[in-house]
Structure formats: structure tokens, C-alpha cells
């Protein structure tokens, strides 16, 4: 087997063993009773992958452009481009839907392994060195603290972990004037897989390219121009996905806006060590072999001065940029993230690994720079040998001497000592870091042939596996303690999903997955067509509409909860919902499309009870008398800021509110059965007394003017309406992108609506995500530029060949 392949396979294997071994030690799913359903992994990634399974199997309500399940109907392409556009995501369809958590875990481990292999391949491409060192350092990159602590529950970010070495490889092709077709295609795939971390990886790869140009005496303005063109074409090819994502973000409900505050320097240094954790600190750990080797580069007299100082200088500059406000914003596309503020940390880990490899490959004799023929220089042989014929996998090539090892060890010790005051530091961090430093330093000082070479490889590999597995296990335990967690999928959830599927009647009526909530996207996870929805692209109009009608939310309005209320169920055509362990059906529901009388649309006020009546067109609530509702009415409470139990007789409901972080939904306290019985409330609130007879009458009146037939498509809706004019109202939010035949949509209380002429009896609307048409045009233009560029290069090559 070729040494490059061997290095890539070993790097992938080491990463899999470390991740799975750490999870097994922590007894975390799928190796033990502790679950992984935390934070966005449970709220977003698992439900979105479940929905992708439905899409791939042809079982989804909607298509790639529009989703009819969550948020009463929302744009889906931005969500696809944010959460599901990874080339690995379709693998979820290989397992049964009930095993979606297993599939997401397998994809997470696979991405980590591919990142390790990609880095190992890049290292072997950058210079000669032992293949097993390339494997260990490649795995060290994939097993960095950012990957183990952050990427594991944000698996879409792991595509950025893969993108960084790939984009650095594209930088090498640009430097050499090679691969004019493949380079832009790799950029496009990386940006499509996850544009957010690909942006950070692109910045990091650009910095690496600048250093490579400086240390190899190949700095040319035209090379920078080639790099810009390659990147621009690649991003342009990804534009059909990127532009809808960008515009979807702009139309989303605003999330948390916070000022960046750098962490204490001691905390920053502490996170360089294994077995540390912190949500708001940079997970910068890489195997101790990496900082040790990077430190040796400063003390290697046989390495040219520029290389000796530029690579460590780049590491220091990137680390410093993470702590300074303006460069922090640059790394995060000029928006401080809502959550962990150090999402670019994997780039620092990658640059540390490249520096460590440089310390192994640039000593021990002259090195040949690979240049393109277009630059007028000769490249190194394609078989991975130096100009002098020395094998690239020579274990003795480039290893630091005793002085350099001592200097590198001193650097690591100084960094560890400086981190001692940090509360992030754990005793195990110091123990494992110390043991790893001794093992790797010893391995570097051993004789470099025969059985000693095998012992050195075992020492370094053991250090990597031990530190990475321990860090994985520690992060697994800490996440469950520090982050929000949710019920994992199990028999109860499968029973609920089966009951919802049996009751499904879409599009005649909606089936709401109901309460208790499993995650932020229960309609995607369990089935049905509900209001619940959580995404970076939650439309502002959806949040505003649900808020006006008494809905609840968390994550400052982006994580919308379902609303269990007979009036909103009628308005949005909910004919069945999960409640109290079973599916409950209702006869007070409207079709998906109704016709309202001519007149101005409703204007919402502060009371959700009145807002529901405005949208319904009838008064159905009564005000309580002396704090109590009339016997026979249903008591509803609106207390958005209250936290605690609310009671009416023997019925108790717990509220969890408190704006601006979260808002409690309107809840039912049950039927008023005793005259004068007042509810006990946890805080200020408003009561509404629902008269079900009035509601039935209001629904009957609207049904008389409702659509006689409704047909939904993966990206639109058609309906046959009664004659007579008015306003056709679709029970779906009017998000940007709706277009209707022969009329311009006009919002009706936040819902999609179209004014009708007196003779019009049909409604036909379709949805196209904003930015899709412009993205397709930009992608086509980038494709033409790419073909022209490749064709021109081929023409010039043939011209030179014929002239010669």
C-alpha cells in the first residue's frame, strides 16, 4: 500500500478509536445509558436529519424549497443549506428512520475520520516525513478540543474541519499553477457543505498560503490573483445555495446580540491542555506532540530563519486574533455568534499541526519546493522523494535534536505553568499533559531505527489516543451537566410517531405533535404539521404572528413552541393533536384555505385573546368576573413572564417564562366547573374564558366560505374557492418568497392572503426562496468563467506544445 494511503487510513482509524473509546468510557450513547440529546444536537440536527430521511424516501410534507411540517409552513432551502447540505448527510437514509440518532452519530464519527485523513494527506503533500508521523498529526488535528467538545454536538461544523486541509491543498495547487478545474470545485463543495465554517477555513487557508509563499520564495502577485479567482469561482458555484441562506438569515427573527468579551489569558492557555471544558472558552487542545513539535521549530538551527519564525508567528497571530474584537468579528463574518464565541478555534489547531509538521520536515538536509512549470521552476518528483532520492517516509528525516526537544518541552511547560491559575484547569489535565510531554519527548530522543522507531511510534500514538479519549469522555460528562438536555428517542417516542402517522390527514387537516415537547423541531422529528420550529432562519413574521396569538418560545424567539389552543387549532386547520398520551381529534377546524369578507386585515394589539378573535372574525372569549370565569367555559391563562405552577382546582400547569430569553405560551387551566373558583397564578397574567359554543358557530360560518378542495405541492398550494369575492387566506405564514397567480399576496394577520375578484374561484400560489434565481444566475456565470479559464489554459498549453 502506498505510504500516503497508509497515513490517511491510520489517521482515520486513530480518530475513530479515540472518539468511540472516549464515548465508551463515559458510557454515552451508543455505548452506554447516558444520552447525547443536548442543545442543538437534539433541537436541530437530529430532527433535520430525520426530515432529510423523509425527503429522500419520498415521505415528507414538502420538498427541497418548502416544508409544510414545521412552523405552519416555512422555507426549507435555507435550512437545507445550513444543516443538511453536507455530502455525508444523505447517508442517514441507509438506516431505519427510528435509528436516526445512530445515523447522526455514525456521520459525526465519519466526518472526524475524513478530517484526519485529509490533514494526513495534506501533510505528506507539503513535505517529506515519516508516514506514521503524518497519520498521528492528522489525527491530532481531527481530535482537537474544538472537534471533541464543540463539533460533536454541532456535526454540521465538522465539514469545516474537513474543509481546512482541503482548502490548504487548493492553495498548494494555486501556488504551483495546477488543477485549475479541480481547485474551484473543491472550494464549491466545501462552501456548500457548510458555508459558515468554510468561510473560517478559507481565511485560515489564505493565511497558510501567504506563509507558504513567503518561505518558499514563490511570492508572486499573479499567484494571489490566481487564488482570488479560484476562490471566487468556487464560491460562485455555491451561490444557488449560499444566496438563499444569506437572505433567509436576513429575514429571520433576530437572535441574541452581545458584545464580544475576550476570555482571561489563563483560561485560553488552559484550554490548550487535555481534559478541560468551557462553553465560552476556546477548545484549543491538540495532542501534546503538536505544541511540543511546534515549539522545537524555534530552536532548530538547521531550519531557515523565515520558516523558523513565520510558522510559530502565524500560530501566535491567529491566537491573538481570537481575543481582539475587530478580528473576532472578521472570523465570524462580522457577527458575534449566539453561543460559543470561539467557533474558529479549529483553524488555530490546524495551523499548529502544520507548524508541527514543518518542524519534522524542514530539517535534516535540503528541501525542494514544488513549483509549477508555469512559474518557470522544476517540481519535486511525483513519487514523494526529495531531489536527492531520499525516501519521504524516512523516520530519521527532519527530527529535532536534543537541544530543540529541550526547547520545545520548555515552551510547553511555560504555557502549562501560565495556565495554573485558571479555574478551567483540572488535575487530570496536568497529569495527562505531563505524561504526554514526557512520552513524546522521549520518543523524539530515542534512536531512530529498528525497534526503537516502533517504540517511538507507540509512545506518540498512545499519547494521542489517551489524551483524546480522556478529553472526549470528560466533554461528554460535562455537556450533560452544563447544557440543556432533552429526552432521547425511545419506544415512547416511536409510539407517539406511529399514532401521529395513523391520524395524519394532510392536507385536509393538520396533525400537531403536541405536548410534552421532545425537542425544538418535533414536527420534523415525530411527524405531523405543527407550529413548533427552531432554526437560524426562523422567519420574523412567524415569530411575530405566533407571539401575537399567545405562543411560547425560547432562544429569544427563534425556538417556537407548539400552541395547544382550540381557537388557533381551528384557524390553522388542526384536526388531531397529541395530548395526555394519546391522539385527540377535534371537529372545530377549518380547511387550509378560507375566504374572508372584504375589508382591512386585522391589526393585532397586546391581548392574544383579542388577536385570536380578530383573526377568527368572531368574539369567542369572555372576560372573567371578579377573577373567575363563567361555569362551562374553558379557562386560559396568558402569563408570558411567569415561571412556576398555575392551578385551577386540582389541575396544575407549570409555566416557564421570562422575556427576553423565553416566553411562556398561553395554557389551558381546564373547564370552570365551580362557580367563583379563582385560579392560583405564579405571577401577573391575563385570563380568557373560552365559550366553545361560540367557537363552533364561528367555525361553521367560516366553513361556509372555505375552499371546496385544496391541493398542496412540494412548493405551493392550489385551492377551489366559492364565488363572491373577498380575501383568500391560507393558514400559513406569509414568509418572503410566496407568489400567486393573477394577484399579489397581501398579509392578513401575518398569514398568506390574496384579494379576490368577484368572479375568481381559484387560488394558485407557489414558493421560491428569495435569492434562488440570483444564485442560479451567479452559479451559471461562475461555471462559464471556470470553463473559459480551463479552455484558455488548454489552448495556451497546446500553443506552447506546437511552438516547441
Image (cartoon, helix red, strand yellow):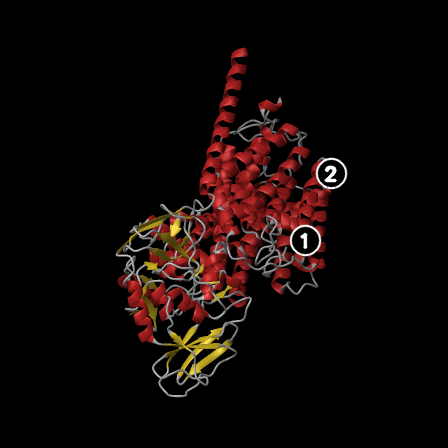
Seen in the image, is 31 located left or right of residue 411?
A: left
Residue 513 vs 767, above or below: the answer is below
SS category of the residue bearing label 1? loop
Query: In the image, residue 684 lies at what x, y percent?
Result: 52, 78
Residues 447 and 9: in front is 9
Q: Where is residue 556 in the image (x, y as percent from the top left)?
A: 53, 63
- Name the residue carrying label 2: 301
Residue 147 versus residue 502 in the image, above or below: above
- Mark toward the start of the polypeptide (1 vs 2): 2
- Residue at (50%, 33%) from the top-left corner? 782
CA distance for labels 1 and 2: 32 Å
Residue 704 - label = none
Q: Could you say whether the residue bearing mark 2 is in a helix, strand or loop? A: loop
Q: Which of 101 and 137 is in front in this view?
A: 101
> Is residue 322 positioned above or below 129 on the image?
below
Residue 266 quadrant: bottom right
- Asked if labels 2 and 1 touch by Cβ distance under 8 angstroms, the answer is no
Left or right of residue 777: residue 140: right
Q: Name the residue under label 1.
A: 323
The local crowd at label 1, few if under 14, some if 14 to 19, many if 20 or more residues have their Cα within 10 Å, is some
In the picture, measured across the screen, residue 613 lies left or right of residue 3, that is: left
Left or right of 266 in this view: 646: left
Q: Which residue lies furthest to the top in this view?
A: 803
Location of residue 127 with respect to 632 vertically, above or below? above
> Residue 419: percent from the left, percent from the top?
69, 59
Amino acid at each position: 500500500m502506498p505510504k500516503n494511503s497508509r497515513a490517511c487510513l491510520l489517521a482515520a482509524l486513530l480518530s475513530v478509536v479515540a472518539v468511540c473509546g472516549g464515548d465508551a468510557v463515559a458510557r454515552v450513547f451508543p455505548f452506554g445509558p447516558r444520552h447525547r440529546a443536548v442543545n442543538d444536537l437534539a433541537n436541530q440536527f437530529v430532527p433535520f436529519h430525520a426530515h432529510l430521511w423523509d425527503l429522500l424516501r419520498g415521505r415528507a410534507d414538502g420538498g427541497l424549497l418548502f416544508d409544510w411540517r414545521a412552523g405552519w409552513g416555512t422555507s426549507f432551502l435555507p435550512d437545507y443549506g445550513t444543516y443538511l447540505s453536507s455530502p455525508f448527510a444523505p447517508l442517514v437514509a441507509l438506516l431505519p428512520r427510528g435509528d436516526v440518532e445512530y445515523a447522526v452519530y455514525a456521520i459525526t464519527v465519519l466526518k472526524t475520520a475524513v478530517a484526519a485523513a485529509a490533514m494526513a494527506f495534506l501533510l505528506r503533500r507539503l513535505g517529506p516525513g515519516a508516514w506514521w508521523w503524518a497519520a498521528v498529526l492528522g489525527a491530532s488535528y481531527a481530535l482537537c478540543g474544538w472537534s471533541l467538545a464543540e463539533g460533536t454536538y454541532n456535526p454540521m461544523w465538522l465539514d469545516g474541519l474537513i474543509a481546512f486541509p482541503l482548502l490548504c491543498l487548493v492553495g498548494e495547487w494555486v501556488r504551483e499553477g495546477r488543477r485549475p478545474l479541480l481547485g474551484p470545485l473543491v472550494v464549491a463543495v466545501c462552501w456548500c457543505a457548510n458555508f459558515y465554517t468554510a468561510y473560517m477555513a478559507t481565511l485560515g487557508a489564505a493565511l497558510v498560503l501567504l506563509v507558504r509563499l513567503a518561505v518558499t520564495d514563490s511570492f508572486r502577485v499573479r499567484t494571489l490573483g490566481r487564488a482570488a479567482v479560484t476562490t471566487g469561482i468556487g464560491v460562485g458555484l455555491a451561490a444557488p445555495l449560499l444566496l438563499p441562506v444569506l437572505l433567509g438569515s436576513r429575514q429571520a427573527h433576530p437572535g441574541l446580540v452581545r458584545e464580544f468579551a475576550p476570555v482571561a489569558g489563563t483560561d485560553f492557555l488552559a484550554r490548550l491542555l487535555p481534559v478541560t471544558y468551557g462553553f465560552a472558552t476556546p477548545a484549543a487542545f491538540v495532542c501534546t506532540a503538536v505544541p511540543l513539535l511546534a515549539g522545537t521549530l524555534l530552536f532548530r538551527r538547521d531550519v531557515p530563519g523565515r520558516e523558523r519564525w513565520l510558522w510559530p508567528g502565524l500560530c501566535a497571530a491567529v491566537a491573538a486574533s481570537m481575543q481582539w474584537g475587530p478580528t473576532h468579528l472578521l472570523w465570524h463574518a462580522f457577527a458575534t455568534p449566539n453561543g460559543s464565541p470561539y467557533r474558529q478555534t479549529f483553524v488555530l489547531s490546524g495551523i499548529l499541526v502544520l507548524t508541527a509538521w514543518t518542524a519534522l520536515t524542514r530539517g535534516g538536509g535540503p528541501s525542494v519546493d514544488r513549483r509549477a512549470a508555469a512559474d518557470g521552476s522544476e517540481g519535486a518528483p511525483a513519487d514523494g522523494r526529495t531531489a536527492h532520492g531520499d525516501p519521504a517516509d524516512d523516520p530519521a528525516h527532519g527530527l529535532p535534536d536534543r537541544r530543540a526537544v529541550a526547547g520545545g518541552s520548555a515552551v510547553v511547560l511555560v504555557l502549562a505553568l501560565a495556565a495554573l491559575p485558571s479555574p478551567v484547569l483540572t488535575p487530570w489535565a496536568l497529569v495527562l499533559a505531563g505524561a504526554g510531554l514526557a512520552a513524546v519527548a522521549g520518543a523524539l530522543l530515542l534512536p531512530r531505527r529498528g525497534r526503537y522507531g516502533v517504540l517511538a511510534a507507540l509512545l506518540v500514538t498512545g499519547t494521542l489516543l489517551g489524551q483524546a479519549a480522556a478529553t472526549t469522555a470528560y466533554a461528554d460528562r460535562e455537556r450533560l451537566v452544563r447544557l440543556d438536555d432533552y429526552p432521547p428517542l425511545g419506544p415512547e417516542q416511536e409510539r407517539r410517531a406511529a399514532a401521529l402517522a395513523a391520524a395524519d390527514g394532510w392536507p385536509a387537516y393538520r396533525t400537531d405533535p403536541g405536548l410534552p415537547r421532545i425537542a425544538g423541531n418535533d414536527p420534523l422529528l415525530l411527524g405531523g404539521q405543527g407550529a413548533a420550529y427552531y432554526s437560524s432562519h426562523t422567519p420574523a413574521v412567524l415569530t411575530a404572528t405566533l407571539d401575537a396569538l399567545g405562543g411560547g418560545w425560547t432562544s429569544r424567539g427563534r425556538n417556537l413552541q407548539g400552541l395547544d389552543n382550540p381557537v388557533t387549532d381551528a384557524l390553522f386547520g388542526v384536526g388531531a393533536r397529541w395530548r395526555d398520551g394519546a391522539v385527540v381529534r377535534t371537529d372545530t377546524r377549518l380547511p387550509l384555505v378560507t375566504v374572508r369578507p372584504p375589508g382591512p386585515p386585522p391589526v393585532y394589539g397586546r391581548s392574544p385573546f383579542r388577536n385570536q378573535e380578530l383573526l377568527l372574525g368572531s368574539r369567542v372569549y369572555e372576560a372573567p368576573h371578579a377573577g373567575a370565569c363563567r361555569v362551562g367555559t374553558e379557562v386560559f391563562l396568558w402569563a408570558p413572564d411567569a415561571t412556576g405552577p398555575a392551578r385551577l382546582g386540582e389541575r396544575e400547569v407549570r409555566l416557564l417564562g421570562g422575556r427576553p430569553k423565553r416566553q411562556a405560551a398561553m395554557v389551558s387551566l381546564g373547564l370552570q366547573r365551580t362557580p367563583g373558583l379563582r385560579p392560583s397564578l405564579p405571577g401577573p397574567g391575563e385570563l380568557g374564558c373560552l365559550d366553545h359554543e361560540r367557537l363552533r358557530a364561528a367555525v361553521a360560518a367560516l366553513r361556509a366560505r372555505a375552499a371546496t378542495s385544496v391541493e398542496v405541492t412540494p412548493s405551493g398550494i392550489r385551492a377551489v374557492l366559492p364565488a363572491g369575492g373577498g380575501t383568500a387566506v391560507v393558514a400559513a405564514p406569509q414568509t418572503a418568497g410566496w407568489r400567486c397567480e393573477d394577484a399579489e399576496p397581501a398579509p392578513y394577520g401575518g398569514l398568506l392572503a390574496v384579494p379576490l375578484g368577484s368572479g375568481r374561484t381559484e387560488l394558485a400560489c407557489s414558493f421560491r426562496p428569495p435569492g434562488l434565481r440570483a444564485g442560479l444566475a451567479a452559479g451559471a456565470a461562475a461555471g462559464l468563467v471556470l470553463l473559459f479559464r480551463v479552455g484558455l489554459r488548454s489552448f495556451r498549453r497546446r500553443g506552447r506544445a506546437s511552438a516547441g
